Image (cartoon, rainbow, N blue to C red):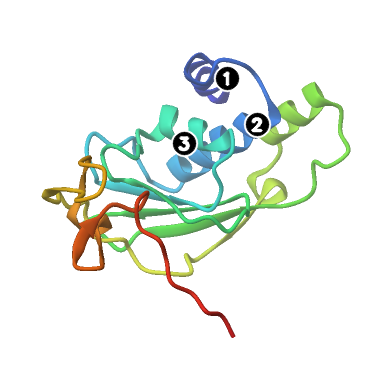
Amino acid sequence: MIWDLWRKAVGFHGHECPGLAIGVRAAAVAMELGFHPAQDEEIVCVTENDACGVDGIQAILGCTMGKGNLIYRGTGKQAFSFFQRGGDKAVRLVLKQSARGMERDARIKYLLTAPAAEVFTVGKPRSGLPEKARIFQTVPCEECGEGAAENKIRLQEGKKVCLDCYQPYERGW
């Protein structure tokens, strides 16, 4: 089964790499724990990195930014938290350093086939289930004219401006 998942993810990602193997294996472990591929937002993944492994999560579990069930939390860690909406199922998988120093193909094979407990630390997520995705009104920026979601608009000198036009005021301490 893992090799079928691998081929599917490689087709989505475009090439084979150890980073993709991390995400494929995280998705496979999540499935072993009872998470099933999402049609909508029933499964949520909070990824703590924006690396190749995230494509494995998308390809296998159907968590995507567009559906609102893939959330990026940029800690830089190879960690993935999975939640099931409508239930209390939640798990956080953090990559262990056990595969460091291996040759590329050997590392891919190890990440995909070694016992899950050797590859990941399995625990509870550090935060709760994220709220469902919301649809926001589009507000035109009064500087550039481009529309932006209302939750990303800032008020500057009495004008509604987008994040690109906003000039933060920081005096620092």
Pointer 3 residue: 57
**CB atoms of marks 1 and 3 within 8 Å:** no
Q: Secondary structure at mark 2?
A: helix
Q: Which amino acid is tagged 2?
A: Leu
Pointer 2 residue: 112
Q: Is residue 173 left or right of residue 46?
A: right
**CB atoms of marks 2 and 1 within 8 Å:** yes
Q: Is residue 2 left or right of residue 97?
A: left
Pointer 1 residue: 3
Pointer 3 local density, CA inside 10 Å: few below 14, some 14–19, many at least 20: many
Q: Say which of 112 and 69 sits in front.
A: 69
User: In the rendered view of the protein, which quadrant contains the C terminus?
Assistant: bottom right
> Residue, x 49% and y 74% (percent of image)?
170
| Residue 113: % across, % down | 68, 32
Q: Secondary structure at mark 1?
A: helix
> Residue, x 86% and y 33% (percent of image)?
102
